[in-house]
Image (cartoon, rainbow, N blue to C red):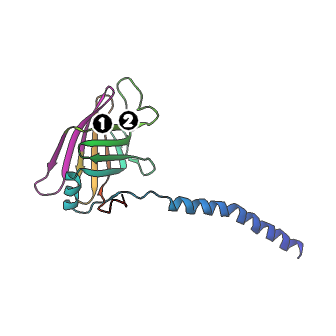
Amino acid sequence: MNLTNIQMHKGNRAIKIFFLPVLLMLLISCGSGKKSAFTQINDYQELREAVYNGEFEIENQWAYPVSGSMIDLLSNPNYLRMKNDSVDLFLPYFGVRHMGGDYGGREGGIKYKGVAEDLEIDEANDESKIEITFEAEEGTENYNFRITLFPNGNASTHVTSSERNSISYRGIVKGKSTGTEEER
């Protein structure tokens, strides 16, 4: 072997050593995604069933603060899960807080887990949407939620607060999948 071949061989080895761990990490991260117990809703009957069976989840893709442009939430974890009369939610908040306190501690959003007070479900006569309203209280802050669910799987959530500017979100609604108990 001459000097040029030895240098090329060392260069190829360095490339392999660098890219092999990167490739392994990429493959592991792609395969470790959590399977969701929820599936995309595609029509009014599925939507109605998910709402009245009391189990659905909303994952928002966009936030619309009062002052400012829309904010992409795809890289910001968020959820709103309803189970019967209980709600578990975390929605990132982008806006102005008017009263004392912090912005939800280190979470930086609207977080609530508990009973959805004054829960109301209204269906449009033409089967174009289902609207859900409820109230929640976290510490000294009171929230009013208005969620509009559409048969194509889209969802709109509007939140007003006693201590912050209102904010809206747009995303998708998913119903509990109908798999076996083992799959859930």
Going 41% across and 59% down the picture, which residue do you hit? 35
Task: Say if mark 1 contacts mark 2, CB within 8 Å.
Answer: yes
**123 over 43 or under it: above or below:** above
Question: Which numbered disc covers residue 166?
Answer: 1
The quarter holding residue 163 reads: top left
Which quadrant does the C terminus fall into? bottom left
Please say if 183 is above or below 121: below
Query: Which quadrant holds residue 135?
Result: top left
Q: CA distance from mark 1 to mark 2?
A: 8 Å
Does dot 1 land on a helix, a strand or a loop? Answer: loop
**Bounds of the magenta segment:** 119-146
Answer left or right for 70 relative to 55: right
Q: Identify which residue, 113 or 168, lies in the foreground.
A: 113
The verdict on residue 136 being magenta is yes
Image quarter in which the N terminus is found: bottom right
| Mark 2 element type | loop
Circle 2 packing at 10 Å, graded few (<14), some (14-19), many (20+), is: some
Residue at horizontal 70 percent and vertical 61 percent from the top: 18
At label 1, the amino acid type is Ser
Percent across and percent down for residue 70 are 37, 46
> What's the residue type where badge 2 is placed?
Gly
Mark number displayed over residue 95: 2
Q: Position of residue 78 (x, y in %)?
A: 39, 46
What residue occupies the far front of the structure in this picture? 182
Q: Residue furthest right?
A: 2
- Residue at the image point whose x is 19% and y is 56% from the top: 48
**Chief SS of the magenta region:** strand
